[in-house]
């Protein structure tokens, strides 16, 4: 085989050179003159291109732009300033390089921006990602719908800057935001009047709106779950509808009396299978507001009939116990022959009784009745007999007896409102009796009844006790001593009953 001759570089174009990977191709160099290489402008341009390629975020400073084109550079101060600016620029470029080297490709990066010597001026407003503390979607003066007269940012040399903190713009925005208040808080047409509210006024109105909303919720809750004067709640209304649908009542006519604890309605009676319903009935609806019962637990918590149940009930069920207590007291009085309303039926906190009056007109109270001297004297002896019967036969003390709780009807005195009545063995039973006697004695003495006894004499006549005292203070001391004896006796009797029950055990039916 003959040897291959070495190629001659000067022998024209050789296409095989591009196909051989082991052959080095000399790079083409653009010719440049010596004057171009020595040019400062070319060197400065090449340096700027190199720095911009390496650090795209770096900002170069043009000293001629900062100092002024055509300025006199013979001054040492001016030259020092130019050198200092150049040094600061190089220092900032070095910080950029250190920052990029330190961060690398990490997702979490640090910045040396605060250590830069020359900070670029950025003419920008607040960030678009900033979220205001209010919802401005429906704000006619918000960032989405600026006012036609509003000016933002720099609008020219010597002009003002308008931002979101501008007084007029902020005031209009606050007026528009009042539409987000509660519906029951009336704010008027503030946008139509171009009303401007300051931040202080808007914040006060906002807090007031919240307080009014909470207050309105409490009021509505109270109206829906409690009875008030001449008004009933939804549960009470449902109970009344059931009575009418069941035929116990034919119709309910309206309110005839209101008190601290209850509301009295007049109704036409219907019919029941096991009991005769009067033609005219009185509905006593106990209020469920609890305000009038919070200080009256002393009448029921020490009553042995309800003592065991009192501590296990919530406040609203205690009100039902008041209605139940009045029903039992009225039944006792009716069995003893005392003039009082007749119980028809009890539904939770609604007590249906016979109506004391005629033709929808209630009987007058003894306080308001116009009686002659003979009728007043007759009424006094009737009250005296009823108090004795109530104490001896019914074993009850009215505990709130006065001319306001006695009615005058058909020439007789009728006792009403006995929900607070207690037995004489109650820890304060004798004290309640003395208070009743004092009220009755003072009323009839002022009414001109000469035979009316004093409160101490009336107390002894009703109770059968013979307490002797020269004044009211000593009389009350004797009463408290008797109540202490009765309380100890009742406590001992209760222990004996409990011991007997534990020894014998419960009896099987």
Image (tube, grey):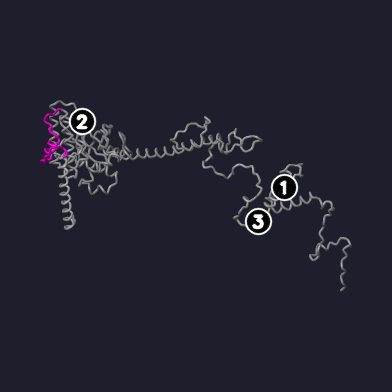
Q: Going from the N terminus, do you reach mark 2 or mark 1 first?
A: 1
Cα separation, mark 3 vs mark 2, equals 101 Å
Disc 3, SS: helix
Q: CA distance from mark 1 to mark 3?
A: 27 Å
- Whichever of labels 3 and 2 marks the residue nearer the N terminus, that label is 3
> Does 24 sit above or below residue 337?
below
Image location of residue 384, percent across then percent down: 13, 35
Query: Is residue 490 highlighted in magenta?
Result: no
Expressed as whole percent of the image width and height from the top left, the position of residue 374 reads 12, 27
Q: Residues within 10 Å of mark 3 (few under 14, many from 20)?
A: some
Magenta range: 448-473
Along the line of sight, the residue nearer the viewer: 241 or 374: 374
Q: Quadrant of the C terminus?
A: bottom left
Q: Residues within 10 Å of mark 2 (few under 14, many from 20)?
A: some
Q: Position of residue 467 (x, y in %)?
A: 11, 40
Q: Is residue 60 left or right of residue 244?
A: right
Q: Residue at x 25, y 47 (%)?
A: 310
What residue did someone put label 3 on?
98
Which of the two discs, 1 and 3, labels the residue nearer the N terminus?
Answer: 1
Instruction: Label 2, secondary structure: give it.
Output: loop
Disc sitting over residue 365 in the figure: 2
Q: CA distance from mark 2 to mark 1?
A: 110 Å
Residue 453 painted magenta? yes
Of labels 1 and 3, the one closer to you: 1
Give the secondary structure at mark 1. helix
The residue tagged 1 is 80
């Amino acid at each position: 085989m003959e040897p291959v001759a070495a190629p001659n570089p000067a022998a024209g174009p050789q296409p095989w050179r591009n196909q051989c990977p082991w052959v080095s191709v000399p790079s083409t160099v653009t010719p440049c003159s010596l004057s171009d290489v020595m040019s400062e402008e070319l060197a400065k341009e090449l340096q700027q291109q190199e720095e911009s390629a390496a650090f795209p975020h770096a900002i170069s400073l043009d000293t001629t732009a900062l100092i002024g084109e055509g300025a006199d550079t013979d001054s040492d101060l001016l030259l020092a300033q130019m050198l200092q600016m150049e040094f600061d620029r190089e220092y900032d470029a070095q910080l950029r390089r250190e920052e990029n080297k330190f961060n690398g490709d990490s997702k979490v990066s640090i910045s040396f921006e605060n250590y830069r010597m020359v900070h670029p001026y950025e003419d920008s407003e607040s960030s678009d990602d900033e979220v205001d503390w209010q919802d401005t979607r429906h704000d006619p003066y918000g960032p989405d719908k600026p006012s036609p007269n509003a000016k933002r940012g720099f609008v020219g040399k010597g002009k003002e800057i308008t931002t979101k903190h501008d007084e007029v713009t902020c005031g209009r925005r606050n007026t528009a935001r009042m539409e987000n208040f509660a519906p029951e808080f009336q704010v008027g047409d503030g946008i139509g009047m171009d009303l401007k509210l300051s931040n202080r006024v808007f914040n006060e109105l906002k807090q007031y709106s919240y307080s009014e909303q909470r207050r309105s919720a409490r009021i509505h809750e109270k109206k829906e779950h409690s009875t008030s004067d001449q008004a009933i709640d939804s549960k009470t209304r449902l109970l009344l509808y059931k009575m009418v649908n069941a035929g116990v009542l034919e119709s309910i006519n309206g309110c005839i009396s209101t008190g601290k604890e209850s509301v009295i309605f007049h109704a036409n009676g219907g019919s029941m299978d096991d009991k005769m319903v009067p033609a005219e009935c009185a509905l006593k609806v106990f209020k469920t507001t609890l305000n009038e019962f919070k200080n009256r637990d002393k009448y029921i918590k020490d009553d042995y009939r309800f003592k065991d149940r009192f501590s296990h009930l919530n406040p609203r069920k205690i009100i039902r116990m008041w209605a139940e207590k009045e029903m039992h007291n009225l039944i006792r009085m009716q069995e003893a022959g005392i003039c009082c309303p007749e119980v028809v039926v009890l539904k939770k906190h609604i007590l249906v009784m016979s109506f004391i009056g005629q033709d929808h007109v209630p009987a007058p109270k003894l306080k308001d009745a116009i009686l002659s001297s003979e009728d007043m004297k007759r009424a006094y002896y009737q009250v005296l007999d009823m108090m004795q019967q109530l104490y001896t036969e019914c074993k009850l003390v009215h505990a709130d007896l006065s001319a306001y709780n006695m009615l005058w009807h058909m020439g007789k005195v009728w006792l009403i409102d006995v929900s607070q009545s207690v037995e004489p063995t109650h820890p304060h039973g004798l004290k309640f009796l003395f208070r009743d006697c004092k009220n009755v004695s003072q009323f009839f003495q002022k009414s001109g009844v000469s035979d009316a006894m004093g409160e101490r004499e009336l107390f002894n006549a009703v109770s059968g006790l013979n307490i002797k005292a020269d004044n009211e203070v000593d009389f009350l001391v004797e009463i408290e001593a008797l109540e202490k004896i009765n309380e100890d006796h009742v406590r001992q009797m209760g222990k004996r009953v409990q011991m007997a029950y534990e020894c014998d055990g419960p009896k099987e039916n």
